[in-house]
Image: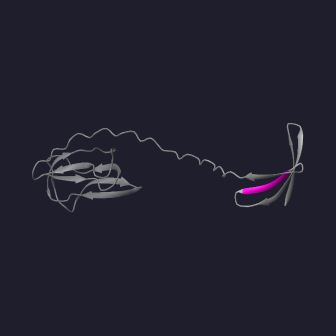
């Protein structure tokens, strides 16, 4: 079938593979016949996957909600670029209360209900995540 010449530690060997079945090969080495049982193929290890370390986030201060209080939350992550209300100010639903920059776009954020601003929890330049409380409305 196939013929090979090997030199191992200075010794020369003429090897001929006569037959090759599933896991048994009949070979002849320098005129002597052998039956050799073939081992299983050793699989190469795969490159390990990188797992990025995510540091734990510090717990946020508890939020106490007063009955009748409405919380205006960030609809998406972004940066506060303008605030047009302050505590004690009367607001209406159709007027924007702040502008949030997200994905290189300015988004006007409107109050969900009319009322009086109790507190503004953000400042211009703050980065907020989705769901962060921006303004409390009574």
Quarter of the view holding residue 54: top left
Judging depth in this view, the residue of 4 and 135 nearest the camera is 4
How does the figure colour the protein chain or chains?
one colour
Main SS of the magenta segment? strand
| Residue 9 higher or lower than 137, as above or below | above
List x then y, in percent, for residue 113.
16, 59
Residue 63 drawn at (x, y percent): 19, 44
Indicate left or right for 123 with 30 as reference. left
Q: Give the number of marks.
A: 0
State the residue in front, 132 or 31.
31
Quadrant where the N terminus sits is bottom right
Give the residue at x 76% y 56%: 25
Residue at image position (11%, 48%) is: 66
- Asked whether, in this view, residue 98 is left or right of residue 17, the answer is left
Judge from the rendering whether residue 29 lies leftward or rightward of residue 67; answer left or right: right
Q: Is residue 59 magenta?
A: no
Looking at the image, which is closer to me, 12 or 50? 12
Whole-percent x, y for residue 86 in the image = 20, 47
Residue pictured at 68% horizontal, 51% vertical = 39
Residue sticking out furthest to the bottom: 94
Residue at the far left in the pictured view: 67
Residue 22, image x and y in percent?
Answer: 70, 60
Lateral position of residue 88 relative to residue 95, left or right:
left
The span shown in magenta is 24-28
Q: Residue at x 89, y 37 (%)?
A: 10
């Amino acid at each position: 079938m196939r013929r090979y010449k090997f030199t191992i530690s200075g010794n020369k060997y003429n090897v001929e593979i006569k037959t090759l079945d599933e896991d048994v090969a009949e070979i002849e080495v320098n005129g002597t016949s052998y039956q050799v049982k073939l081992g299983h193929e050793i699989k190469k290890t795969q490159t390990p996957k990188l797992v990025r370390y995510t540091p734990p986030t510090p717990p946020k201060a508890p939020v106490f909600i007063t009955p009748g209080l409405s919380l205006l939350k960030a609809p998406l992550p972004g940066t506060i670029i303008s605030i047009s209300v302050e505590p004690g100010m009367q607001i209406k639903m159709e007027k924007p209360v702040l502008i949030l920059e997200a994905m290189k776009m300015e988004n006007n954020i409107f109050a969900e209900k009319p009322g009086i601003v109790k507190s503004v929890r953000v400042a211009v330049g703050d980065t907020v995540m989705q769901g962060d409380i921006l303004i409390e409305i009574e």
